[in-house]
Image: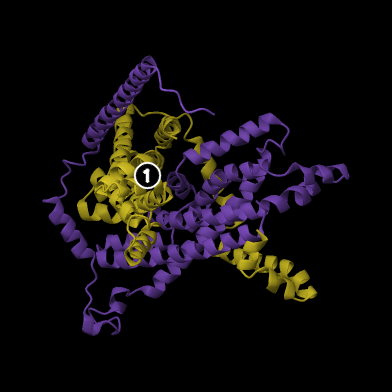
Amino acid sequence: MSETAAEHGLTPPAARRPAWLRRLAPPLLTLLGAAILAKMAADVGFSPAHLIGGTGRLGRLVGSMIPPSSGGQFLHILHALGETLAMAFVGTVLAALIALPLGILGAKTVVTQPALHFALRRVLDLFRGVPALVWALILVSAFGLGPFAGVCALALADIPNLAKLYAEAIENADRKPVDGLRATGAAPLGVIRFGLLPQVAPVMASQCLYYLESNFRHAAVLGIVGAGGIGFELEERIRVFAFDVAAFIILLYMLAVAILDTVSRALRQRLA
Amino acid sequence: MSLVAPAHPDVVESFEIERRRLLARHRLQTSLGLVVFSLVLAVSLKRSGFLDANIGGDPLARIGVFFGRMAPKLRADELLADRRTVGSLAAWFYDLPLWLKAAWQTFEMAAVATVVGAAGAVGASFLCARNLMPWSPVRFAVRRGLEAIRTLPDMILALILVAAFGVGPFAGVLALSIATVGGLGKLFAEINEQIDPRPLEAIEASGASRLRQIRYGVLPQVLPAYASYALIRLEGNLAAAAALGIVGAGGIGLELQRAITYTEFDTYLAILLLMVCMIFVIDIVSEQIRHRLIGLGAPR
């Protein structure tokens, strides 16, 4: 590890600094950090007074959540939950279908043209941080209310991430089967089908399951901007202060998340 | 070390039978999996109304129109003109100073939430690490609490907190902080459980108090890993904070919402690009710092 530190050029300058600076720097830096943090906290209104002021209201709000009640709409809520799960599933499948070719093209070992590989990876990197909700907001505005926009938003948010993971999985695959196939004169598609896919398919499937879990969480909030599913029901209830029904929806949803996570974990363990 | 003896025909035959049996089982499993997958997909397609969604006409044409509306109206000859000229870059990014301020607020939200959340996570992680908290009911309760937080999406938390604390960045910061405690608490506890017990035992043997044992026996071992995870979380929180603005928690998300309210799709694209660049820059900076931390930090 000392080699790494030396590579980064860290050890020599630190050793060159005078003793008083080395002694004073940590407390000064801590103080500076604390000052910046305090300024930021003030900017976002993070103050004890604000916290205490709202806590009473939060307490009353949580109080009105007890006991949770389905409000006689259990089937309706269940239906919305099913819609959210369906959105997450279709979104994941759509994302995987589009990310697969992108991932293959983004792998250094498949596309050996460095400029092309670099450009694709940078574009993917750029859009990796955009959350599904941000896509959903504009897609709902463009395609109208409903789950269609939600599914597209989930897929758009996942594609860059999945493509990157796929590209890495392909790069990490063993080269020998590929070389062997190539030596037999197999066509490029055949090389990918029999040399690469058997190695990377379990990894990819397991990542898909992981993204399915994550999409189920994200899909739940897409309803807030009108993209259908359980989030829509939840936001509606919170807006009319029906917090007992909101609590019911949240609990049911948390249960569904736990079930999906368990199923997905079991499947992923089988794949591994 | 003799050569392999020619196999007995029976052995070959039984091997072939076994192989065929395994292959058949494998094929059955694969086809069963495919059937289940197609069934779930079919039900999901039906349920989500993805295929028969009415998005106002031919889907491909609609997508074309959508991208057309999102594309900025730039003109090559006016590109560098002032913001009153139609077709200039300045006209596309017409409210840039305001957006930069909003982006900075989003960053502040993410930074404060990460620090507050990480502080809470450190406390929680000491309460649920097997080697540091001898009392198992506390460990159990804290672990289940962290799990419950992780199940709840930060956006739903934000919805409730906005209802309690009013519209503004504070509710968003609080929601992100709580979510960060849940996420980092688990990771920190795992780091705590992997520490070398020997320095801790040595300090304990010297008769130091519990707090000093943690200060000198545990913290030096775990801090680099803590900081590294907190930075990764900061990247995630930045994206989450941007999205939180959409539910009324201030920052750049609020500007996105505003652009949609006025159906200015090209403005939306401008703000989106700004946001993407901000996240990209923070990712790079954070990665640099993390690499340094690992280089300097605990020997692995």
Along the line of sight, which residue is nearer the eye, A203 or B280?
A203
Q: Colour of chain B?
A: purple
Count of marks placed on residues: 1
B200 displayed left or right of B118? right
Is residue B165 depicted above or below A5 in this figure? above
Q: Amino acid at mark 1?
A: Pro
Q: Position of residue B166 (x, y in %)?
A: 46, 53
Q: Residue furthest front?
A: B2
Q: How is the image coloured?
A: by chain
Q: Left or right: where does residue A113 sit relative to residue B196?
A: left
> Which residue corresponds to the image point at 24% horizontal and 49% vertical from the top-left?
A187
Residue A62 in sight here = yes
As helix, strand or loop, the secondary structure at mark 1 comes to: helix
Of B141 and A77, nearer the camera is B141
Relative placement, left or right, of B139 versus B104 is right
For label 1, the residue is A177
The residue positioned 13% from the left and 56% from the top of the image is B61
Q: For residue B76, what is the image quadrant?
A: bottom left
Estimate the x, y position of residue B55 in percent, counting from the top left: 16, 49
Q: Residue furthest left?
A: B57
* Quadrant (top left/top right/bottom left/bottom right) for the N terminus of chain B: top right
Q: Residues within 10 Å of mark 1 (few under 14, many from 20)?
A: some
- In which quadrant of the rendered view does residue A206 lie? top left
Q: Residue at coordinates 42% horizontally, 54% vertically from top-left?
A: B244
Can you give x and y, in whole percent of width and height, for residue A251 in the image? Answer: 44, 32
Residue A243 appears at what percent x and percent y?
42, 37
Query: What is the chain identity of the residue bearing mark 1?
Result: A
- State the yellow chain: A
Closer to us: B297 or A108: A108
